[in-house]
Image: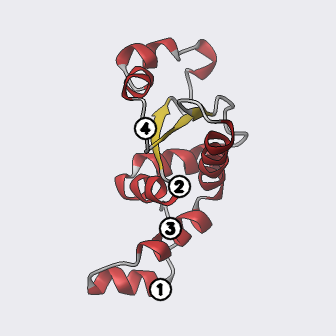
Amino acid sequence: MSLDVPPKLLEQAEQGEVDEAEFVDCVRDSLPYAWNLVATLATQLRVDGGAFADNQVPPATETERGQLLRALASDAIRGSMERHFGVKLAFQNCHRVAVFPIEGLDADRYAKFTSIRGQLLNQSPTLRDC
């Protein structure tokens, strides 16, 4: 299961509309590694500026890796995190997450990061099992 859904939030979903802020809280509480990584990168992007900020350090545990994969594999979770942090997320391999600013998105830099070429250049034998 990807998220530890509180009964109140599940009840909202069963009745129709869901409060996105409550969903975001659920994501933060359920996937703390993924949440903190994206939060750190979003802060780094705002502080340092530049075209994007990225992580190149693999998660320390399989639990952390699983959280990251679940967060970024779900359109709903990923989209909510993007809206919350005001960034565009990009993902390569099992850990290379990048955040791009929504305002003034450098389309060329984003396209390069998410391209087939970018994916191939980010490969290494040490990442084979990630």
On screen, 122 above or below 67?
A: above
On screen, 32 above or below 95?
A: below
> Which residue appears at 37% of the width and 58% of the height?
76
Q: Mark 1 and mark 4 in contact (Cβ < 8 Å)?
A: no
Which residue, as the protein is rendered here, is positioned at the far left?
A: 16
Res. 7 mark: 1
Q: Secondary structure at mark 2?
A: helix
Q: Residue 120, position in %: x, y?
A: 45, 14
Q: Residues within 10 Å of mark 3 (few under 14, many from 20)?
A: some
Q: Earlier in the sequence, mark 4 or mark 3?
A: 3
Q: Secondary structure at mark 3?
A: helix
Distance from Cα at disc 3 to Cα at disc 2: 11 Å
Distance from Cα at disc 4 to Cα at disc 3: 25 Å
Q: Residue 20, position in %: x, y?
A: 42, 72
Per the image, the residue denoted by label 3 is 24
Closer to the eye: label 1 or 3: 3
Q: Mark 2 and mark 3 in contact (Cβ < 8 Å)?
A: no
Compare residues 63 and 35 and report the one nearer the observer.
Answer: 35
Q: Residues within 10 Å of mark 2 (few under 14, many from 20)?
A: some
Q: Residue 54, position in %: x, y?
A: 60, 33
Q: Quadrant for residue 19, please give it.
A: bottom left
Q: Amino acid at mark 3?
A: Val
Distance from Cα at disc 1 to Cα at disc 3: 15 Å
Res. 85 mark: 2
Q: Earlier in the sequence, mark 2 or mark 4?
A: 2
Specify whether residue 89 is in view.
yes
